[in-house]
Image (cartoon, coloured by chain):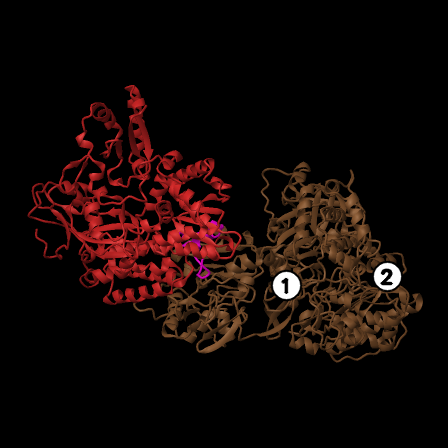
Amino acid sequence: MANRRIVLCAGTGCVSSGSLEVRDALVRELTKRNIADQFEVVTSGCHGFCEQGPLVIVHPEDILYCRVQAGDIPELVEEYLIGGRIVERLLYRDPVTGKSVSDHMKIGFYAKQMRNVLRNCGVIDPENIQEYVARQGYAGLRKGLAMDRMAVIDEVKRSGLRGRGGAGFPTGLKWEFTFKAKGDKKYIVCNADEGDPGAFMDRSVLEGDPHAVVEGMLVAGYAIGADEGYVYVRAEYPLAIKRLRVAIDQAVQYGYLGRNILGSGFSFTLKIKEGAGAFVCGEETALLASIMGERGMPRPRPPFPANAGLWGKPTCLNNVETFANIPLIMRQGGDEYAKIGTPRSKGTKVFALTGKINNTGLAEVPMGITMREIIFDIGGGIKDGKAFKAVQIGGPSGGCIPESLLDTPVDYDSLIKAGAMMGSGGLVVLDENTCMVDLARFFMDFVQSESCGKCPPCRVGTKLMLETLERICAGEGTLGDIDWLVELGTKVKAFSLCGLGQTAPNPVLTAIRYFREEYEAHVRDKTCPAGACTALVDFVVVPEKCKGCTRCIKVCPVSAITGKVKEVHHIDPAVCIRCGACLETCRFDAIIRGKAAKVGEVAS
Amino acid sequence: MADQIRLRVDGHDVVVPAGETILAAAEAAGVSIPTLCHAPMLRPSGACRMCLVEVEGARGLLTACSTPASDGMVVRTRTDQVVEARRTVLELLLTEHPLDCLTCEKTGDCRLQDYAYEYGVTGRDVAGQSRKERAPGEAMLDDSNPFFIRDLEKCILCGRCVRMCHEVMGYGAVDFVSRGASTKVTTAFDVPLQESPCVFCGNCLTICPTGALHPKASRGKGRVFQYEKVRTICTYCGVGCSIDLHVREGRVIGASAAPGPANRGLVCVKGHFGHDWLHSPDRLTTPLIRGEDGTFRRAGWDEALDLVAARLEEIKGKGGPDAIGGLASAKCTNEENYLFQRMMRAAIGTNNVDHCARLCHASTVAGLAASFGSGAMTNSNWEFEHSEAIFIIGSNTTETHPVIGAVVERGRQAGATLIVADPRETEMARRADIHLQHIPGTDVALLNAMMHVIVTEELDDREFIAQRTEGYAEAAALVAKEYSPQRTEQITGVPADKIVAAARAFATAGRGAILYSMGITQHTTGVDNVRSIANLAMMTGNVGRYATGVNPLRGQSNVQGACDMACLPGNLPGYQLVADAAHRGKFEKAWGVELSTRPGLTLTEMVNAAADGKIRAMYIMGENPMVSDPDLNHVREALESLDFLVVQDIFLTETALLADVVLPAAAYAEKDGTFTNTERRVQLIRQAVRPPGESRADWRIISDLLGRLGHPLSYSSPAEIMDEIAGLTPIYGGISHERLASGEGLQWPCTDRNHPGTPFLHGERFSRGRGQFAAIHYRPAAEQTDGEYPVILTTGRILYHFHTGTMTRRAAGLHATVPEGFIEVNDQDAAEMGLADGLKVRVVSRRGSIVTAARVLRTLRRGVTFMPFHFAEGAANILTNAALDPIAKIPELKVCAVRLEPLAPPGPAIAVNAGHTHGGEGR
C-alpha cells in the first residue's frame, strides 16, 4: 500500500514548464528502484503558484519543491524520498529574506491566502470524481436536493455571494428572478469565457476542480427549475475543456447528472459550448447569442436573461468562480459563509497576479484584504527590487490603483469608488518602468479590436481614443488631447450598449486621474518618464560607466553604436531603433533610457 | 385594465398596451424619438444609441426601441444628456462617413443627413480629430451585381439589412464580419452577393438609412426630390405588392417597395428592379396589320379597328358567334377583363371566353367550388405569420410568391412547424421541418396517406366535421382502408415515417394553413388534388378561422380578378352562372342584349377547336399561348389554321407574330384600374407614365371596338367601369375606386359600401352551406415513363423570370442574372447518361424536342427533371403533355415523360460554371 502521496501540479502553467515529463520521470525512477508501490503519484490542477512551477508536493509532510525538472528526479528520489534529506536547492526561497522554506503553507504566497474555492485545486486529481467526493464533493448538492427550492435560493441570498464575473450582482437575487420567471423550460449557463488579458482564475478552477462547478450548476438548476445547462468555455482552454468533459462523464456515471439525480426526481443535463475567442462573448447576452449559433453580439437589456435568455427562455447565467462557491455555501450554510468578507462583499475572491511581481500566480483572499497585502505579502513585492507604481485591476474594463490607494480594501464597492472594478480578478502589477500612457494604449488597443462593432460609441469612440493615445505615445499629442480623452471616454461609458464599451475607457480615465503629469510629460515635454514609449526615449551611454568593451556595438542590429575598445561608446539616436539590445547586454549599467543631447552638444 | 399601462413621456400622459416599447409609447404620445437601427418588422437591436432616453429611477440612459414601457414610468426624451448622446452618436458616425451628400444618391432621403441637420452636426467638429480621408483607390464599393450597389464606406452598421435578411427574408446572405473598427456587413467569406444566398429582393435597400445600398440602374437618374412617386401594384405575381414607381420626365427611373396591406413594405427582385422594359424600344407603338406579302405594316387605329370589327362580323356571319373565341388577360385590370368578356358575350354573342387561369388554377376554381362553394384563397397573406403549422404542397413559394415566402418564414421563425411537399428541394423545402419529396403526380396518394394517419390515430376534428361538413364517413373510410403510409410509400416514394410525422404535426397544430400552387393544379388530377387538400383542411378543422385555410397562391397580378370578372366560359361576373337564368337575366337587362346559353369553350378546348376548324377567329388580349401552353407545336398549328387572329399586347410576342392584326396596348404603369390579388384584395393601380407611341389602354381599345361591333358604350374612366361591375356583382358590390383610393384595398366578398371586406372565407358557414368531403382515389399521371421516355419532366417558374418572359427578359438585371433556360437533372442520373453540369442536352418527348443546358443537382429525386417554362427558345412547353383534367380542363404541365440525349461528350477537362444558381433552383 502506498503510504505517501506525491502531487504534481498539472495546471496549464506547470504543464507547459514540463510537469508531465517530471511525472513520467518520477514514475520511471520509482519503478526502476522497485518502490513504486510505496508512492501514490497524482497530477492535480493548478496550485496557483505558477511562477515556481513545475511544483511537486509530497504528503503527508506537505513539503513543496519548486521548479522541478525531469533531470532533478533521480536526486529527489535518492535524497529525499529514500534518504529523507531535504533537497535544499529545490525549495522555495523567500525573495525578501532569501531563506528557503520547505513547509508549503508557511510560504508567504500561501500563508495569507484563504483557499476556499481553490481548496481542491492542487490537492485532488481533477479527473477522479472519487477524490472530489472524498472531500465532501456533492454533499452540497445532496443537501440542496433535500431542501425546498426557494430555501436553497434563500441560503445563497443569506451568503451574500455576489457575481464573481466582475459586476458583482447578488447571485441569490439573480436565482430568485430566474426562479420566478414564467416558463416551462429554463437554462443554467456557466460563463467560462475568461477573456481579460492576464486572467486565468476560471481556467484554473475548471482544470483543478471541475466538479465544484458542475455541483454549483446542479444546485442552481435545482433551485430555479432548470433541467439543462451549458458551460461556455473558450476554445483556447483545451485542458479545462478536457477535464470538464471527464468530470461531466463521471458525474453522469455516478448519478450526479442525468435523470432523477440521487433519486430526487430532479433531472439535469450539462453541455459544453466552446467559444471562438471573442472577448465580447464574456458579456452575457453576447454569450447567449453565441451558444445559439449567432454571432456573439450583445443586445440591450431588459429583457434580462433571467426572463428571456437562451432561445427566449429564462436563463440563469453565472461565472465559473460564482458556481464554484456554491458547494461551500450549501455545505456550511449561508450565514457561516457570510462571516468572511466585508459588509457588502462576502466570501473570498481569487486573483490572478501577473506583471512585475515576484510571485506570479493565483491567490484566493478574503474580501476586504488590502491591495498592499496581496501585492507585497502574497505577491512577494516587485521584481528586481524596482519601485511599485500602480496595479491594474479588472483588466481592460478596470482601472489602475496608485500607491496612495494601496490600503484600499479589496471589495466591489471600494474598487468602483477608486475608478476601477473587481472585474473577473486579474491583477497586473506595474513598476516604475511601466508607462501609464502606453498601458492605457495597450488596453484601448485590446478593447477596440475586441469591440463587436455594434454600437457607435464603442466601435468608433474607442477607435478615436486609441488613435489619440497612439499620437500621445508618439509625441504628437496636445494638451487638449488629454481633456478630450476624458470627455470622450465619459461619453463612451455613458452611451455604449454593453459592459465592454461601458467600461472600455476605465483604464484611460483612471490613468489620467492618477497619473496626469505623466500624460502631460508626453505632450508637453515629449518625454516618457518611464522610458517605455520608444518614440520619446533615447538610449544613451553614461560616459562614467562605459568601459569600452564593445559588447553593445556587437549586438546593435543597425550599427548605431560607435566607439573603440576601451573608449566611451556613442549611440547615434538618428540610427537607433530603440530595440534595447544594448541595454540588456551591457554589464556595467552604462546604457540608460534618457534624452540624447542635441546635435552639436555631443561630446566627442 | 391590467394589460394597459400608463406612463408619462415628456410630460404627456399616455396609455398603451402592456408590452409596448418606450418608443411606441412616445409615438402614441406624439413625441418623436430619433432612430437609425430601428425599423418596422425587425426585432429591436439597440445598436445605434440614437433613441437613448432618460427614465426616472433607471441607472443610465435606456434605448427606447428595446425597453418595454412599464406602468408609472416617467420618460424624458429631450434632456441635455439625451441630446448629448444623440449628438455624440452622430459626431462619431460622421468621423467615418463620407461627407459627399452633394453627389450621394440618397440625399434627401437619408436619415443620417436628416439627423445631422436637425442636431447641427457637421462631421468636422470632433475636437482635435482630423477626419480620416480614404485614399481614392480604397473605396469600399461593390457594383458587381446588376441590381444594387453596396457602398460600405457609407454603411453605419445599423444592422437593418442584416436583420431584414435573417429575420424577414430568411436567407441570411449578409451578416457582420470582423470586429472593432474593421467590422463590416458582408457575405460569408466576403464573396460578392451573387455568389451568396442573396436573392436581390432589395428589401435591405428599402430600409437602409443611408446611401450604403442603392439601386444600380437609377444611379445618376434622379434623387427623391427630383422624381415623383406613383403608388401602384406590382405587375408580376399574385401577391399584390404595393410599389412606388419613380417617375421623372415621363419615364419610370426606378421603383421602391411601398407599405401596402398585401406586402407590408416587402418586395421581390422583380417588383423592385424589373420595370425597365416599360421603356424598351421593342414596345409596340402602333397597330400592325399583316399585308398581302405576309409581313406587318404600321396602321392607324381606325383602320386597324375597322378591320378587326369587319373580319369578326364576317366570321360571325359565316360560322356563328361560337366560331370566335377570346382569351382575356390575367395581367390586365378587372375593368378591362370585365369589358372583354362583355364584348365576347354581349357584342359577339359567345361564351367562348377564357384566359390563362385555365393553365394555372382552373382546378382550384372547380375543386374548391365543389368542396367549399367558392374557389379562391380562403385566408390572407399575412395571417401565416401566426399559423402554428404551415403545409406547403406544390408551391415553390420563395421563388414564385417571394413575399408570401417571407410571411411563411416569419411564421416559421415564430415557431410554426413547416411541412413542404415538393419533388424538388426548393428553398422552402430546405427550411422545412419535414420535407416530403414525392414523385410528381402522386399528390392524392400522399394527401390520402396523411389523412389515413389522422383518421386512424383519431386526430380528426370531430366537432368541426359534425357541425360544418358532410360526406366525411365515406372519405374517411376510403383513406383508412386503402392509403396506409406503408402502402403509399410505394406510390409516392416518401418514407412512411415522414408521412406520419407530417400528418401528426399538421393535425395537432392549433392553426394549420395549407398553401399550394401549380404543383397541385397542373395535373390531369388537378381537381382531385385540390379536393384532397380541402378534405385535409376540413378534417383537421382548419377552415374558416384566422391563420388557417386552403390557400391557392395565384400566379399573376390579376388572375384572381380575371376569374372574378368571368373571363371563364361558364361564369358571369362574381361566379354567377351562365346556366342560371336569373343570373343571366340580370346581365341581359343591364347590357340590353340576349345572352347565349350555349356552353363556352375553355382555352385548351379552343385551341383544339381551332385545330379542328370549329373556331375560325380568336381575339387574344395580353396572353402568350405560344410559350405558356402545353404542346406548342399543336398550338402553333391551331393558331395558324385560324382565319383571323387579333393579338392585343405590349410587345410583339411569339403569339403576336402569328396575328393578322396586332393592337398596341398600355402596360400596367400606363393606366388606371384595379387588380385583385391572390387574397381576393382589390387594389388600385395608377397611371405613372403615358403609354408609348400610339398605344392605348386595353379598356379604351375594347371600348372603341365595341362601338364598331354594334354595342356602343362610352366610359370616361375605369372607375366608371368598376361602378358598373359593382352594380352587377354581389361580391364586388361595395367596391369603388373612390373607396380604394382612401383605404387599403378591399377583400371580396365586399357586398356593399359599408362592408369592410372579408379577410378569411367560410367563417360561420361555407359558401355552399356545409363543406363537402369527397372520397378521392389516386389516379396516376396521364403519361408514364417507359423504356423510350424514361424520365419525368416537371415544369415551373424561377425567381428571376415571370411567365413567358415577355417582360422579365427585357428587364436588364433579371435577364442578365438568368439569361437562358436549363434543365435540372439529378447528379447520379446525369453521371449514368454521361451528362455534366452546363453541357447541352437534347430533351425529347412524344410531342417534340428542344435543346437546353443541363444543371446537375444532388438534391433532385432520381428520375425527375425540371425545366422553367419562361424561355421561348428551347421552350419547355414544346415537350409538355396537353392531356386535360376531365373537369377543369387544365393540362398536365407538371408531368410528362422525356428522354435526355447529351449533345457533347463529358470530359474532366471541361470546367463548367452553372451560372447563377441562386434563387433556390440550383443551390
Q: Residue furthest left?
A: A544
Q: Amino acid at mark 2?
A: Leu
In this rendering, would A556 be left or right of B569? left
- Residue assigned mark 2: B601
Q: Which residues are magenta?
A: A280-304
Give the colour in which the image draws chain B: brown
Q: Which amino acid does the dot numbered 1 rest on?
A: Trp
Image position, residue B90 (x, y; %): 40, 69
Q: Is residue A241 covered in magenta?
A: no
Q: In this view of the protein, which residue sits in the foreground, A69 or A267? A: A267
* SS for dot 1: helix
Quarter of the image that includes the N terminus of chain B: bottom right
Q: For mark 2, does the 10 Å Cα neighbourhood hold few (<14), some (14 to 19), or many (20 or more) residues?
A: many
- Can you identify the residue that label 1 sits on? B382
Task: State which quadrant residue B145 falls in.
Answer: bottom right
Q: CA distance from mark 2 to mark 1?
A: 36 Å
Q: Which chain is red?
A: A
**Disc sitting over residue B188 in the figure:** none
Read off the chain for label 2: B
Residue A451, quarter of the rendered image? bottom left
Identify the secondary structure beneath mark 2: loop
Q: Nearer the viewer, mark 2 or mark 1?
A: 1
Residue B302 visible (yes or no): no
Residue B284, visible in the rendered structure: yes
Instruction: Indicate whether residue A294 is drawn in magenta.
Output: yes
Mark 1 falls within which chain?
B
B204 or B453: which is nearer to us?
Answer: B453
Do dots 2 and 1 share one subunit?
A: yes
Residue B475 in picture, x, y percent from top left: 80, 51
Q: Position of residue B449 (x, y in %)?
A: 74, 46
Residue B732, image x and y in percent?
75, 72
